[in-house]
Image (cartoon, rainbow, N blue to C red):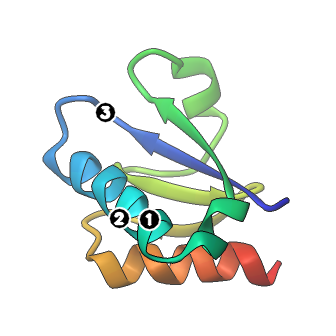
């Protein structure tokens, strides 16, 4: 099963949208449920967050490979999920 790591902050409006798009896409297409998503609150886990190379949230990683960083549209989240499935 592919595993994504998503770094977010609770007060970040773009992070809220990224999580919303994930849920919508998983509801719309069950194949996306095959992607495990490790949701990390950057403010609660600074040590882990600092071990990755990013500047903005939300940020998606597949392993240590950055797939997307910053403001996301629903289509961007779809591309991230597709990349994870293709790995």
Residue 4 appears at what percent x and percent y? 66, 55
Decide which of 77, 71 is in the foreground and name it.
77
Decide which of 75, 30 is in the foreground and name it.
30
| Residue ID at (78%, 84%) | 86
Tell how many labels.
Answer: 3
Say which quadrant the C terminus sits in: bottom right
Q: Which residue is mark 2?
A: 24
Check the image and report above or below for 51 versus 16.
Answer: above
Please identify the quarter of the rendering in which residue 47 is found.
top right
- Give the number of the mark in front: 3 or 2: 2
Q: Which residue is mark 3?
A: 9
Please identify the quarter of the rendering in which residue 81 is found.
bottom right
Between disc 1 and disc 3, whose residue precedes? 3
Residue 27: mark: 1
Residue 67 appears at what percent x and percent y? 57, 71
Number of residues whose C-alpha sits closer than 10 Å to that of mark 1, classed few (under 14), some (14–19) or many (20 or more): few
Residue 2 appears at what percent x and percent y? 79, 62
Check the image and report above or below for 29 versus 46.
Answer: below
Badge 1 vs badge 2, beta-carbon distance below 8 Å: yes
Measure how far apart labels 1 and 3 are at the Cα level. Answer: 23 Å
Residue 50: mark: none
Residue 49 appears at what percent x and percent y? 55, 32
Measure how far apart labels 3 and 2 are at the Cα level. Answer: 20 Å
| Residue ID at (53%, 38%) | 39
Check the image and report above or below for 27 versus 7.
Answer: below
Number of residues whose C-alpha sits closer than 10 Å to that of mark 2, classed few (under 14), some (14–19) or many (20 or more): few
């Amino acid at each position: 099963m592919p595993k994504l790591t998503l770094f977010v902050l609770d007060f970040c409006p773009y992070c809220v949208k990224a999580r919303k798009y994930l849920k919508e896409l998983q509801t719309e297409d069950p194949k996306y449920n095959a992607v495990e998503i490790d949701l990390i609150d950057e403010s609660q886990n600074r040590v882990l967050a600092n071990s990755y190379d990013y500047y903005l949230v939300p940020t998606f990683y597949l392993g240590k490979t950055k797939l997307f960083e910053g403001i996301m549209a629903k289509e961007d989240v779809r591309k991230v999920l597709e990349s994870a499935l293709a790995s």
